[in-house]
């Protein structure tokens, strides 16, 4: 079977190398050889491995117009022209494998609706790299009614937060290290501002709960505001800060969001360190499941891409997989009715009654407190860390307003989601 690879970056190169190297093994598994016949690249001046020279092309027509290319593997990244190439390949009856979460999150339903038996769209590598979560949701767990998915689905931010937590390094230092290891997106804002994680949770939520979750409606908060003090104080509370992507079915609608969250050390995702990804799934009748593994980088992504290529190839011979993405929009939970716990850290004057006036502010706003912690402080000022019980955002905002005008409170240093129960 002749296939083509679009893009020869870290992942593309590794995919071609493994397919070349393991040709016999894969042929034995499939009963047919997979041959990378064409590799589409953009930059004519870049040096490429010699074994790939005869297959290079700079013209997408050499792939899309070639009826003998049965599977197109899109590893270029970015939205356009990747989306157009995928759409055309599908229209022309080719199967497509992609690692492109932007294309799937923004155009997945239209693309898969264009499909027909034998023209599949596979994207295991788009979410959580090497973890087989897409196929698990589409197939292995299809017999469940799923209730919740919590994930650490961005390796770069998990690496940064883990380095800050374990070694006390600065945010900038940890970011640089993540970039030099090749985890970060070309524009690190996509990682830091949770754009990448929002795309991934919108894809997971759409597969798990059966309605399409528009990525622009996913509530999203990044990690730029997390400071070394936040990380240290979290530690003092027996907690850790993680960028948690979550999708949860509630009677009023689907809750989908990404935010840095203070989680207890006993939380299933608390020990997921470095650039690892993890996805926790809860449903009936399965109960709880935890998937963990490398979520970013060449080897993890190539593993998922090659699995999809073999699957697509096999499916071509039996009439296609055709697992379509849902087209109908999901019913989302309105933000106003969503209850969350929050972590707040305040600087207060070291005076009698300071703590009482803080407690009074929460009491007046109708917000119940679960943890109040005061680390040893100086003569004139003190720090107070608080974790609330789940509350409506409007009640929290009311408490913050009152705190703002409370004489003993100097300033709020932090306010992030918490999940300590
Ligand atoms: N930038 C992404 C991450 C790469 O850090 O997880 C994999 O999608």
Image (tube, rainbow, N blue to C red):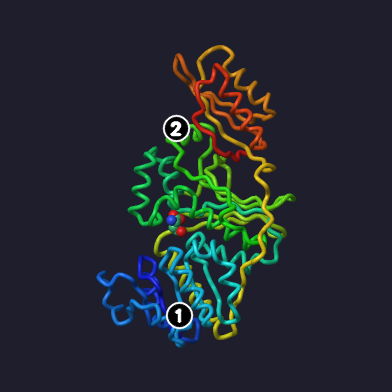
Seen at 63% across and 22% down, the residue is 359
Q: Which mark is residue 229?
A: 2
Seen at 65% across and 44% down, the residue is 335
Q: Which mark is residue 26?
A: 1
**Percent position (x, y) of residue 320?**
58, 80
Q: Is mark 1 within 8 Å of ligand 1?
A: no
**Mark 2 crowdedness (10 Å alpha carbons): few <14, some 14-19, many ≥20:** some
Query: Looking at the picture, does residue 301 appear above or below residue 290?
Result: below
Q: Nearer the viewer, residue 149 or 82?
A: 82
Asked which secondary structure carries label 1, the reply is: helix
Asked if labels 2 and 1 touch by Cβ distance under 8 angstroms, the answer is no
**Looking at the image, how many numbered discs can be counted on the residues?**
2
Which label sits in the foreground, 1 or 2? 2
Asked which secondary structure carries label 2, the reply is: helix
**Percent position (x, y) of residue 46?**
26, 69
Seen at 52% across and 68% down, the residue is 123
**Percent position (x, y) of residue 349?**
50, 16
Q: Nearer the viewer, residue 181 or 46?
A: 46
Query: Looking at the picture, does residue 253 appear above or below residue 87?
Result: above
**Percent position (x, y) of residue 263?**
56, 41
Q: Nearer the viewer, residue 366 or 23?
A: 366
Quadrant housing residue 214: bottom right
Tell me which image quadrant ligand 1 sits in. Answer: bottom left
Disc 1 to disc 2, C-alpha distance: 51 Å
**Residue that extends furthest to the top in the rendered view of this protein:** 352
- Left or right, 345 with respect to 34, comes to right
Query: Looking at the picture, does residue 412 appear above or below residue 175?
Result: above
* Badge 1 or badge 2: first in the primary sequence: 1
Of the 4 image quadrants, the one containing the C terminus is top right
């Amino acid at each position: 079977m002749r296939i083509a690879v679009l893009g020869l970056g870290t992942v593309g190169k590794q995919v071609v190398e493994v397919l070349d190297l393991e040709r016999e093994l894969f042929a034995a598994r499939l009963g047919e050889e997979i041959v990378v016949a064409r590799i589409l690249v953009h930059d004519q001046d870049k040096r490429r491995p010699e074994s790939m020279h005869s297959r290079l092309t700079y013209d997408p027509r050499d792939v899309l117009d070639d009826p003998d290319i049965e599977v197109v593997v899109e590893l270029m990244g970015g939205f356009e022209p990747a989306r157009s190439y995928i759409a055309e390949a599908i229209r022309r009856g080719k199967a497509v494998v992609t690692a492109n979460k932007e294309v799937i999150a923004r155009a997945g339903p239209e693309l898969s609706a264009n499909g027909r038996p034998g023209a599949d769209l596979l994207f295991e590598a788009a979410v959580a790299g090497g973890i087989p979560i897409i196929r698990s949701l589409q197939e292995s767990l299809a017999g469940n009614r799923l209730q919740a998915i919590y994930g650490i689905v961005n390796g770069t931010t998990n690496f940064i937060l883990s380095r800050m937590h374990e070694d006390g390094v600065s945010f900038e230092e940890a970011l640089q290290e993540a970039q030099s290891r090749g985890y970060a997106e070309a524009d690190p804002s996509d990682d830091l501002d949770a754009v990448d994680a929002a795309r991934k949770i919108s894809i997971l939520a759409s597969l798990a709960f059966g309605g399409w979750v528009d990525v622009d409606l996913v509530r999203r908060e990044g990690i730029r505001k997390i400071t070394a003090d936040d990380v240290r104080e979290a530690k003092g509370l027996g907690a850790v800060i993680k960028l948690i992507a979550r999708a949860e079915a509630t009677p009023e609608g689907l809750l989908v969001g990404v935010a840095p969250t203070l989680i207890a050390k006993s939380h299933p995702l608390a020990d997921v360190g470095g650039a690892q990804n993890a996805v926790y799934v809860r449903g009936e009748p399965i109960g709880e499941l935890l998937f963990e593994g490398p979520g970013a980088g060449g080897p993890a992504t190539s593993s998922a891409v090659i699995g999809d290529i073999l699957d697509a190839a096999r499916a071509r011979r039996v009439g296609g997989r055709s697992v379509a993405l849902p087209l109908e929009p999901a019913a989302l939970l309105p933000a106003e009715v969503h209850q969350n716990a929050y972590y707040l850290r305040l600087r207060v004057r070291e005076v009698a009654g300071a703590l009482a006036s803080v407690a009074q502010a929460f009491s007046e706003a109708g917000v119940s407190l679960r943890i109040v912690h005061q680390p040893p402080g100086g003569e004139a000022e003190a720090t107070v860390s608080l974790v609330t019980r789940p509350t409506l955002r409007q009640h929290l905002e009311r408490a913050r307003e009152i705190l703002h005008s409370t004489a003993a409170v100097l300033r709020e240093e932090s306010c992030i989601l918490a999940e300590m129960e």
